[in-house]
Amino acid sequence: MVNKTKDGILLESGTNEIEIMEFTINDNLFGINVAKVREIMLSDTVKPMPHVHPAVEGIFKPRDIVITVVDLPKYLTGQECPKGSKDLFIITNFNKMYVAFRVHSVVGISRISWQDIHKPDNTISGGTDGVTTGIAQCDGKLVSILDFEKILAEIAPQTSIQLSEVDAMGQRSRVDSPIWVAEDSILLSKMIQAALTRAGYENVKIFPNGRELWEALENLRDVEDLDSHVALIITDLEMPEMDGHHLTKLIKHATRFRDIPVVIFSSLISEEMRVKGKEVGADEQLSKPEIGHLIEVLDGLLEQKQRKQQGGR
């Protein structure tokens, strides 16, 4: 059994690096962000549960917590795969949930730059239905980074962003402030945009990673009224080419852009990640899928920004 501890997380902030745990399914190489992994253990006896997604094996209780087990080979192939005695469970924690994913073996951990992770085109990723969020080269091998948030959202939709949280906020006025969002997941970017639009934020622009948002921001260095182009930025953490911590660090270290509020909205918010987010200057850090809380934070930050601008006149 291998336990992941605090020492396993990249402690330096804003370096645009990631540690990837490589694992195999049917001899194919896949990867997961080490920050999502809490433990690796030998597969155990699983209690089946009725009326669940076909890829959900059931539950098991390794110690003091009941954990759902997802048969990742079955999910990826759509077919029943033989379960071996040497199979492993990767115990993950994201979206404030513990989930175990069955895999065939764990190869090791590689530390690489997000610049070396590229978004696959639609022929590889499957487009909006695909679960490959990036392709990385680790020690000369190509590794498919899986979108575990999308996998979990498909298996258990109630664990993802819920538009009902926005509806529960009641009638809201229209807000024209331009909001920029960096989010690599096609599914989540659509859900975030739909939620913000329903909440009255009509001027939302989505970028597939931090690098593209940063390049668009740099094109605004010489505009007179920056606020009319971008009033607030929301960023995910895990993104090919440039992650959210590095993006936030660039924004907050640039005199021209440092006053733009930056909200980190990620499934990876933890005590360690909060420390990193604070170090790079994030104004707020929220855990997915709490979309209602995100909207309340946006309201507050924009109101605070408006008061500050009026007070400076």
Image (cartoon, helix red, strand yellow):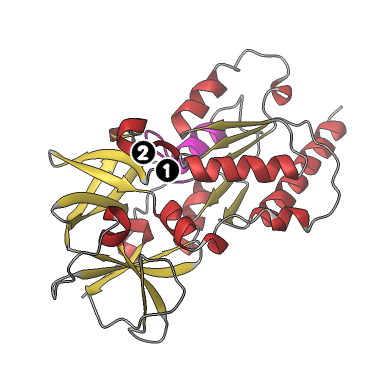
User: What residue sits 70% from the left and 31% below the top?
Assistant: 231
Confirm whether residue 262 shows in the render: no
Mark 1 and mark 2 in contact (Cβ < 8 Å)?
Answer: yes
Circle 2 Cα neighbour tier, 10 Å, few/some/many (<14 / 14–19 / ≥20): few
Q: Which residue is mark 1?
A: 129
Q: Amino acid at mark 1?
A: Asp
Q: Position of residue 119 (x, y in %)?
A: 35, 34
| Tag count | 2
Q: Amino acid at mark 2?
A: Gly
Circle 1 Cα neighbour tier, 10 Å, few/some/many (<14 / 14–19 / ≥20): few
Camera-nearest residue between 197 and 108 = 197
Q: Which residue is mark 2?
A: 126
Residue 34 drawn in magenta:
no
Q: Quadrant of residue 205?
A: top right
Q: Secondary structure at mark 1?
A: helix
Q: Quadrant of the N terminus?
A: bottom left
Q: Quadrant of residue 222?
A: top right
Per the rendered image, the range of residues in magenta is 237-253
- As measured in the structure, the alpha-carbon distance from the residue carrying label 2 to the one carrying label 1 is 5 Å
Q: Position of residue 7 (x, y in %)?
A: 31, 63
Camera-nearest residue between 41 and 251 = 41
